[in-house]
């Protein structure tokens, strides 16, 4: 028995291939084989079998295919081969020895090829690996989005193997074979620059220089005409080498040099899409990859630490090293890590990642899934493809980094377990961790190499002062400079804020300040009490700040989030943004706040602790100010992102509108603010809940609804559950209904349908209790969607019709259009094309606004499908074509694919097929 994915999806037996039947059954088998010996959930299988809205009976369809497939395997005596199709709760697993799967044998042969000492043996292994391919991967299956990603990944691996084989041929001097192999593949993939470059070199080495140069010029013109880009460095370098008459390594080069590393097959759909590596998913290469870089800027005025920098370089040598910088608070661990990272960019050709784990921050640690999400997005994964669980996201991160040369900086780690979940998978990756703890568990489990960081020596501390104050001033008072370095305990943070005070006061002597610091010597004993030395230095700095800056600093300490803009700072201090910005600039000059991006500041953790102590009685007033600022700004963002949308609500009785509220130019800017501020808004809502401001907490959360709708599967449930607690604590039926409606919809998108139904059933009654007819309408729509998915179509139709009635009575066209859209689709599912057509037309008559172009396309598609169901093929095709055209015009590729697939079911026109494939390609490029 043999399972084949590298070609037509099939099961070969001694008596011939099993009759698998329809394409969706092959899709099911492919999805199970790509995750062989690993459970695959019903939800994942649904994504593989349908790329538009699955039918309400999707689970039953899948169960039927599983049952038939299980019978086919049993009839072929699969058990004798160790093959079993088992059910595990809400998932299925296909257990099979890896030797029975052609894609696994393909990977094994690639590994063997990599281990061969001579190119001749490598050629044998690579040729055998490529012989397993019988056509495009996953042929004969209905390729839902995850399967398209997997097929593309497998094809990428095949092409990389072809390139590897050509280099092995070159190492043997068989350049004519390499040229023949590459010519065929280049014809099929004319825009793949790496193939073209390899072919050019093979042709030249075979004595065919004119053909090699012609290949370059043809590829260059094709890239310019098709993609509007110039050749990347691989192609340009090959051209230059040929012109110089020295094309690459000479014949006989060791295979490890000439043939290069063997590629590996891409990840399965269960693990998500690969990083694009400079190429758009599902399409041709579009130039060289741009290394990702999340590093903050290099520290300014960095001095000393030569021994530690050298120790880091030694620790970073070797395979997949984990370097651990440890030391007390304020000693400069982050500065050392960033200085080293910025000094060595060439060591990391694929880029540098950075995450502040806030292990010792009062703001709390970020969720691991949030850190992994940021890393995966930076590596090119589409937001919709980021796994929702930490283990799955960590596995995808390891997979994407397996063959990259990356630096991963994990700053302020609290424990070993947090770090382990964020370690990359590649042997060429370096992980640099900073922590106040020794993290001995990480040393034991992952051979982390510690680089302990102590306080600065007196000479280095003096050099740091000279870097800020100028050498002349320090040389004029060398004894006082050394005394200052000693009094600051060699702590870089204390030295910097002290130097900042002196820099702003050229009339002061170093000896004068040294005398003041001497009076604080008890509090500067930071080695006995970790934060005391910093507090003493900060207190001395703050004493000489203008009153407005001191007031601003004191209020900043009460912000529950981590970042500040002038609007938030003004709300905390009860001033205006202009005054707040001036105060922030003054604080930045004293190194008390740091500007991480234009108009965006942060407080160091230790400075935050000190700032809170300046005016502890103002904590409640400052918190109310920032809460009302968040409400006002989020309300402005929601109104800009979704004008006329729901929900809206009255403000709290004691709401204090900020003096100024940020304006948003357009939807993109508003959505960007909501995304950027998501973490701080969550921390602020949590602080409101803890402080008893429940009326603010649920509003701050609920006003993020445009972002929740746009990225429904982005782990919003915990935040909405917090909003639900706040609404119930307030005994506010309006708030509870609104939160339940949104939470139910998010749970539906997460595949938690039963939980969603249980919540949504309570929402309409609460809305009626609160006299909120539009809230009731929205709740009924979301409830109807869940009921339809659960197979309760008659009830769903009834609830959706009730929502239409409520919205119409309230004169709310937005909600009425939404209700009619879902009602039309439900009628179509219930085989009532006339009713579906009537509802869709009514929704179109309401005139969806321009920003609702996607809704208009969906409504036109329903009209077209209804016309087809009524036997009017000509009008149905016309309407579906129009729906597809409008979706294409507005960049709504999912709608275009849906409409064109409906067209292809009744028409074989080549134009529809071409547009369908192009829309699919664009979707793949976005993922």
Image: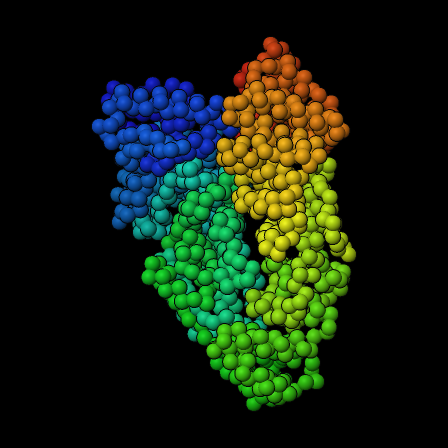
Is residue 546 or residue 872 the one in the foreground?
Answer: 546
Residue appearing at x 59%, y 80% in the figure: 466
Is residue 773 or residue 77 the one in the foreground?
Answer: 773
Q: Position of residue 44 (x, y in %)?
A: 45, 33
Is 76 positioned to the left or the right of 606 in the image? left
Residue appearing at x 26%, y 43% in the figure: 121
Residue 257 in view (yes/no): yes
Up/down of 911 relative to 524, above or below: above
Up/down of 519 relative to 62, above or below: below
Is 847 positioned to the left or the right of 32 in the image? right
Q: Position of residue 187 (x, y in %)?
A: 46, 32
Q: Position of residue 234 (x, y in %)?
A: 48, 47
The N terminus - image quarter: top left
Up/down of 22 relative to 782, above or below: above
Is 420 positioned to the left or the right of 546 in the image? left
Residue appearing at x 28%, y 44% in the figure: 112
Residue 206 in view (yes/no): no
Q: Quadrant of residue 16?
A: top left
């Amino acid at each position: 028995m043999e399972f084949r994915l590298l070609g037509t999806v099939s099961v070969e037996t001694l008596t011939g291939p099993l009759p698998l039947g329809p394409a969706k059954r092959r899709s099911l088998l492919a999805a199970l084989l790509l995750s062989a010996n690993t459970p695959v959930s019903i939800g994942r299988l649904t994504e593989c079998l349908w790329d538009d809205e699955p039918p309400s009976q999707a689970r039953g369809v899948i169960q039927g295919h599983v049952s038939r497939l299980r019978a086919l395997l049993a009839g072929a005596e699969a058990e004798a081969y160790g093959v079993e199709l088992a059910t595990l709760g809400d998932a299925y697993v296909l257990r099979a020895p890896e030797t029975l799967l052609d894609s696994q044998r393909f990977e094994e042969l690639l590994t063997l090829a990599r281990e061969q000492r001579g190119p001749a043996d490598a050629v044998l292994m690579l040729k055998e690996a490529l012989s397993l391919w019988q056509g495009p991967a996953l042929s004969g299956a209905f390729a839902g989005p995850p399967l398209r990603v997997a097929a593309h990944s497998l094809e990428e691996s095949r092409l990389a193997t072809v390139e590897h084989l050509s280099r092995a041929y070159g190492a043997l001097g068989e350049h004519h074979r390499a040229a023949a192999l590459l010519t065929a593949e280049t014809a099929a993939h004319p825009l793949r620059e790496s193939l073209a470059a390899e072919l050019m070199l093979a042709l030249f080495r075979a004595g065919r220089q004119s053909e090699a140069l012609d290949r370059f010029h043809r590829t260059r013109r094709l890239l310019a005409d098709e993609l509007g880009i110039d050749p990347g460095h691989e192609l340009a370098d090959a051209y230059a080498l040929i012109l110089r008459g020295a094309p690459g390594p000479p014949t006989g080069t060791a295979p490890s040099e000439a043939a290069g590393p063997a590629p590996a097959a891409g990840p399965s759909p269960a693990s998500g899409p690969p990083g694009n590596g400079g190429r758009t998913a599902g399409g041709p290469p579009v130039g060289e990859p741009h290394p990702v870089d999340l590093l903050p800027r290099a520290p300014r005025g960095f001095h000393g630490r030569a021994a530690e920098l050298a120790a880091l370089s030694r620790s970073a040598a070797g395979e997949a090293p984990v370097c651990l910088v440890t030391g007390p608070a304020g000693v400069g661990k982050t500065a050392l890590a960033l200085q080293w990272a910025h000094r060595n960019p060439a060591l990391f050709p694929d880029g540098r990642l950075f995450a502040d784990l806030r292990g010792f921050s009062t703001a709390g640690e970020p969720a691991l899934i949030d850190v992994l999400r940021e890393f995966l997005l930076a590596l090119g994964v589409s937001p919709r493809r980021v796994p929702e669980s930490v283990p799955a996201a960590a596995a995808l991160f390891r997979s994407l980094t397996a063959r990259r040369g990356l630096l991963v900086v994990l700053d302020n780690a609290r424990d070993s377990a947090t770090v382990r979940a964020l370690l990359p998978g590649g042997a060429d990756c370096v992980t640099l961790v900073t922590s106040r703890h020794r993290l001995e568990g990480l040393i034991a489990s992952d051979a982390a190499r510690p680089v302990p960081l102590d306080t600065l020596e007196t000479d280095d501390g003096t050099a740091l002062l000279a870097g800020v104050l100028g050498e002349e001033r320090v040389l004029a008072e060398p004894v006082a400079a050394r005394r200052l370095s000693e009094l600051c305990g060699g702590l870089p943070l204390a030295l910097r804020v002290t130097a900042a005070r002196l820099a702003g006061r050229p009339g002061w002597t170093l000896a004068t300040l040294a005398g003041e610091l001497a009076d604080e010597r008890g509090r500067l004993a930071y080695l006995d009490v970790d934060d005391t030395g910093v507090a003493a230095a900060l207190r001395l700095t703050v004493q000489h700040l203008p009153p407005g800056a001191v007031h601003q600093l004191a209020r900043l300490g009460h912000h529950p989030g981590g970042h500040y803009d002038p609007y938030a700072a003004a709300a905390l201090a009860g001033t205006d943004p202009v005054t707040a910005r001036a105060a922030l600039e003054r604080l930045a000059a004293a190194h008390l706040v740091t500007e991480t991006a234009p108009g965006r500041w942060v407080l160091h953790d230790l400075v935050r602790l000190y700032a809170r102590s300046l005016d502890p009685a103002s904590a409640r007033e400052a918190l109310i100010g920032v809460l009302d600022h968040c409400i006002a700004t989020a309300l402005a963002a929601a109104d800009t992102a979704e004008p006329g949308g729901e929900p809206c609500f009255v403000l709290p009785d004691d709401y204090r509108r900020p003096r100024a509220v940020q304006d948003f130019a357009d939807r993109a800017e508003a959505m960007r603010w909501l995304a950027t501020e998501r973490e701080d808004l969550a921390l602020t809502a949590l602080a409101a809940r803890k402080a008893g401001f429940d009326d603010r907490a649920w509003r701050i959360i609920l006003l993020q609804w445009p972002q929740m709708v746009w990225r429904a599967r982005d782990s919003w449930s915990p935040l909405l559950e917090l909003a639900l607690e706040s609404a119930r604590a307030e005994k506010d039926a309006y708030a509870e209904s609104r939160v339940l409606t949104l939470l139910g919809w998010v749970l539906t998108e997460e595949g938690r349908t039963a939980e969603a139904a249980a919540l949504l059933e309570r929402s309409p009654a609460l809305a009626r209790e609160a006299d909120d007819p539009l809230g009731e309408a929205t709740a009924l729509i979301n409830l109807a969607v869940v009921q339809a998915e659960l197979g309760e179509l008659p009830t769903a139709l009834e609830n959706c019709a009730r929502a239409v009635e409520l919205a119409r009575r309230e004169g709310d066209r937005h909600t009425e259009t939404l209700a009619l859209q879902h009602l039309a689709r439900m009628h179509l599912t219930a085989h009532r094309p006339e009713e579906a057509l009537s509802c869709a037309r009514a929704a179109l008559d309401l005139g969806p606004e321009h920003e609702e172009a996607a809704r208009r396309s969906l409504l036109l598609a329903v009209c077209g499908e209804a016309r087809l169901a009524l036997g009017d093929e000509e009008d149905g095709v016309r309407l579906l074509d129009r729906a597809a055209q409008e979706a294409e015009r507005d960049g709504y590729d999912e709608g275009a694919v849906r409409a064109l697939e409906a067209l292809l079911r009744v028409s074989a026109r080549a134009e529809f097929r071409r547009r369908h494939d192009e829309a699919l390609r664009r979707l793949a490029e976005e993922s």
